[in-house]
Amino acid sequence: MTWLSAVPAITIAVLVLLLPGALLAWGLRARGFALFALAPVMSVSLIAVAAVAGPVLGYSWSIVPVAVLAGLATAMAWAARKVLARTWPDETGRRRFDRRFYSAVAGVALGALIIGARLLFVFGSPDSISQTFDNIFHLNAIQYIYQTGQASSLTIGGMTGIPFYPAAWHAFAALVGQLSGASIPVAVNAANLAIGALVWPLGCVYFCQQVFGQKMHAALLTGVLSAGFGAFPILMVDFGVLYPNLLSIALLPGVLALGVQTLGLSKVPDFSRPVTGMALILAVPGISIAHPSTTMAFLVFLLPALCYLYIRAARRWRASWPASRRPFLLWTLLLLAGATVFTVLWDVLRPPADAAFWPPIHSYRRAIFEILTSSPMARPPAVLLTAFLVVGLVVLARRRKTWWILGLFAVASILFILVSGFHPGDLRNFATGTWYNDSFRLAALLPAATLLPAAAGAIWLWEWCRRCLWRPLRAKLIDAGTPAARRRTAASAAGFSVIALTVIALLAQSGSMDYSAGRARINYQLRPDSQLLTADERAILGDLDRIVPPDSIIAANPWNGSALAYALADRKTLQLHVLSPISADDAIIYSGLRDANTNPAVCPAVRNLNVRYVLDFGTEEVNDGSHPTPGLMNLEAAGVVTLVEQRGDAALYRLTACR
């Protein structure tokens, strides 16, 4: 299959991420670049809320409830903004399409092209799948949505017997598959391509605009830098795979940009403060249902900014104390109340202790080195990003107004140091248990915190070169030249900018990015020895829909990849995931199907479950697991099955016993 044939699915993924949210952002009076930057944030919220409401209101999952909700939310947002505008005029919303808009779009386009090319390389083929543990759940969950008609986070966990699972990514991927008619693997890759190559650079450029202003070169540099982190987005399509984290972290910069505006720290706010607060409230459901841990990252990342504002205000209140006692007391009480709520959320929104079992991976010294060199999880150093980061930290440290950015970077760094370099204990569990004490998840959050300091360094170096090197030379050339020479000088300036930007883009791709892309590509290759599905096993799954009747259940060990018969062929196995609960009948078949002719307990279990076929994919399991199912071995020799199809060591059998 070629990528050209996947263009419709990719196009639909982009449109689903942009159109519903753009309508809602328009209702909030977002204009110019903000209209596009906030579109994915709002779209995911609309998708997530519409999905959760499905079981309550009784409709099946499709694009229709998303469109209806988008229309209703837009009307309500427009009306609310009109009411608020009477007290808080919103002049900032008049920003339109100008040179700053086009430079921001160009920056996003640069990041999208680079990240898109990397992801195409990683995926290899549009219908490839990640050969990793969690992908069994993610792919089968989309088929579960198709069959149940529900994409709610409160129902999708029914596939594995859990009450809640963050399912915004699954709802989005299911929409891509429904609207494009693409297979589940193609829909998944199209969805992830749109998330990584569009949502992430959009949010990064918008975040930096809010903090540093709408400088043209800043937008271009930020777009290039967004594509230079080996830890995101590639790490989330490599390890796990953690597709919900991919979506939630891609949304994080855009939501942080709204947080910065709400706190009044933006240089170019797009809304009045109340409207920004409303936009932030509308954005929270999306990032939270995509993955709650990223919501906690958002809160803790903004904590230094909040402390900075409080300290600055306290100094101002002290200067006029008699008149400022009440505001000081009010804001202190609000801060304490917020800290209490945050502490409760920090304790509640975390997995069970037995699920947060990931150990530290190296020393705290190594963790510090990896943070400064943008090379977490033992990746090669990103030399250019390191230079930009060091310069940026110095620049930000010299400006008191930007100290909160240093605090944001410090918080993310401390979390990564604790999770990867400290021994298990109460401190580590309290600080990083929200992320399962998993170094990979916190490593993927580092780029969102590193972006601002690195961008600050890149912008400062660019402006220094232009001020100290190019402008004096340009002045001499203009003074000595003719009008034609002046025009050539201007053209040369543009040419040098393009060359410099190209060099930065190429250098940013060396080291960590090269390694990350090559490492991730291995997990998407279909080989004779692939860990989850071999080439022979996938070939058999490709034939199931024409051999196995839709109502038949297939006996198989889910740990060897055979459970993917559900996602890839729409045929159910005993367990749809390795963590699905095992019934008494399941246990009888797993332990004794080969004894069906002699064990009287087997045939009633077979009939209860309507088991008519068996998949034998051998004993090699994903993640080198060991979960033997002796009842499914040597079936042909036991005389209970007949061979239907065999590819290498993989075989499909028809159950002949128990008739």
Image (cartoon, rainbow, N blue to C red):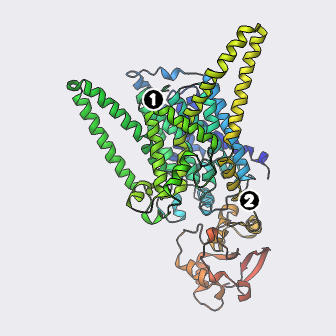
Label ID, residue 399: 1
- The part of the image, by quadrant, that contains residue 107 is top right
Check disc 1: other Cα within 10 Å, few if <14, some if 14-19, many if 20+: few
- Measuring from the top left, give residue 258's x and y in whole percent: 48, 34
Judged by depth in the image, the label closer to the viewer, 2 or 1, is 1
Report the front residue among 520 and 244: 520
Residue denoted by label 2: 525
Secondary structure beneath label 1: loop
Q: Label 2 sits on what residue type?
A: Gln
Under circle 2, the secondary element is loop
Q: How many marks?
A: 2
Answer with left or right where residue 582 lies relative to residue 621. left
Q: Earlier in the sequence, mark 2 or mark 1?
A: 1
Q: Residue at x 63, y 40 (%)?
A: 384
Determine the image quadrant of residue 13.
top right
Please give left or right for residue 64 compared with residue 488 in the image: left
Q: Nearer the viewer, residue 316 or 631?
A: 316
Relative to residue 375, is residue 393 drawn left or right? left
Residue 518 visible to the viewer: yes
Q: Residue at x 42, y 32 (%)?
A: 262
What is the x, y in percent for residue 323? 22, 24
Q: Looking at the image, is 575 positioned above or below residue 407?
A: below
